[in-house]
Amino acid sequence: MGQAQEQEFKQLLKEQYIYRETLALISWDMHTCLPKKGLEQRLETVGFLSEKLHELQTSSRMKELIELFKEDAADRVLQKSALECEKIYNKQCVIPAKEYKEYVMLRSKSEALWQEAREKSDFSLFQPYLEKIVEYNKRFANYWGYENHIYDALLGQYEPGITVKTLDEVFPKLRKELTTLLKKIQESKVEADSSPLYHYFSEQNQEALSLELINRIGYDLEAGRMDTSVHPYTFGISQSDVRITTRYNENDFQIAVFSALHEAGHGLYEQNFSESLKNTPLAEASSMGMHEAQALFWEGFIGRSKAFWETNADLLEKYAPAGIHTLSLEQIYHSLHAVKPSFIRVEADEVTYPLHIMIRYELEKGLLTGEIKAADLPQIWNEKMEEYLGIRPETDREGVLQDIHWASGDFGYFPSYTLGYIYASQLHSALSKTVDIEETVRQGQFSPIKQWFTKNVYQYGKMKKPLEIIEDLSGEQLNPDHFVHYLNKKYKKIYQF
Ligand code: ZN
């Protein structure tokens, strides 16, 4: 391979990176501070830049260079970049342009209809659009190809290496354990509820507390910032500019603090990709689930631990109202671990959350294979909620219509949320072999943890698939036992069973 070709390939990768960086910056702006009247013009700009990026990703020259570099083992980063570019190329080129355009239009109509249906709590308004979206996704899955199950084609877009076969083994096992644990918690005499934490806590003080906390765990505020948005999110603009957002409720400070820790977890991942991945498509998370695992680790495993609030008691005293900072450590810890089945996924606790995901997974799979008809969704949804969580939604709004994912055509995405918990627990177990996590956190020493993650997870970006990361660390495949063990140990103490 000539040097000129290498230069050309690197240059093309860099140009694509610049478009992605610009689009991410615009996206941050749109979510945080864009004036309402600026939206229309900005959307035109987004359309223009996206088209340019698409042209670069799918040009015939790009295809030639992909072929040339995907076999070249001399430079691993270039080779892996070529393979990643090939994935993007195939994903975009295999769908006929006309069909894709129709789909994009259908999707925006479907999102609008979903919104209306949700407001009116009437699934029948959304149903015909959902049917069409499912049909398109079936067609796309067939274009992309799969070996065993049509759903694998969609799942693979978000979670490379994970298949229906794996999930069908792991999810039922996990479900059994979670429902058993939930039953024990519900039967316990101990009642943990969050209400001791509900005190007026000014937004300004919540912001100051959140900033100090994320700074302590190692999120680099000189390579990022924290703003406010309706849905907390992480905007990886470049490795040296990873911005997060949070949201506030002045009567429940948990929302802001745990959103900030969650997003800072995502942020830590993106701030610590290896320098060698700069300007390549590999400077991204290994998968959606692995990204989620980093957020859940810092939010849940660290942020909700007793040691974390012990070491950060000084900050609570500095910023929190007296009603909160005079609570005992034990009271705070208990209040942070209220478990109760609820209808809305995004409000669920860590014990019941994965059960919400399993319901969606089973329904998506059934829609894709045709075993479930869209018209039957509300009823099957409610039945499964009753079976898994023991509660039955009264309305479509708090049932089948609560998430935007299906309206946006994001089939195959939901499992990543539960995989995030499983990966995080496996990483937590691996970390605990070299670091005394509780003691380290109690001393406020977060850097050994961050260093471990940088060395074993963060730096690789997309160089490794999620299960390669897990296997290299533990020799294991996907194993839900670590998550089950972690939850049982923790809740056993809190609920005394
Ligand atoms: Zn997240």
Image (cartoon, rainbow, N blue to C red):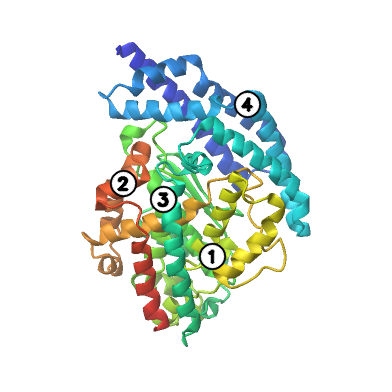
Which residue is denoted by mark 3 in the rendering? 166
Residue placed under numbered mark 2 in the picture: 469
Q: Residue 255 carries which label?
A: 1
Residue occupied by mark 4 = 48
- In the rendered image, the vertical position of residue 436 relative to residue 69, given as above or below: below
How packed is label 2: few (under 14 Cα within 10 Å), some, or many (20 or more)? Answer: many
Which of the two labelled residues, at mark 4 and mark 1, occupies the earlier sequence position? 4
Q: Tell me the kind of residue under disc 4.
A: Phe
Q: Point out the image quarter for the C terminus.
A: bottom left
Between label 2 and label 3, give the one nearer the viewer.
3
Amino acid residing under circle 3: Thr
Q: Where is residue 326 in the image (x, y as percent from the top left)?
A: 45, 82
Which mark is first along the chain, 2 or 1? Answer: 1
What separation in Å lies between label 4 and label 3 (alpha carbons)? Answer: 40 Å
* Cβ atoms at labels 4 and 3 below 8 Å apart: no
Q: Under tag 3, what secondary structure? A: helix
Vertical placement of 110 versus 351: above or below? above
Q: In which quarter of the image is residue 128?
A: top right
Whether residue 161 sits left or right of residue 443 in the image: it is: right
Judged by depth in the image, the label closer to the viewer, 1 or 2, is 2
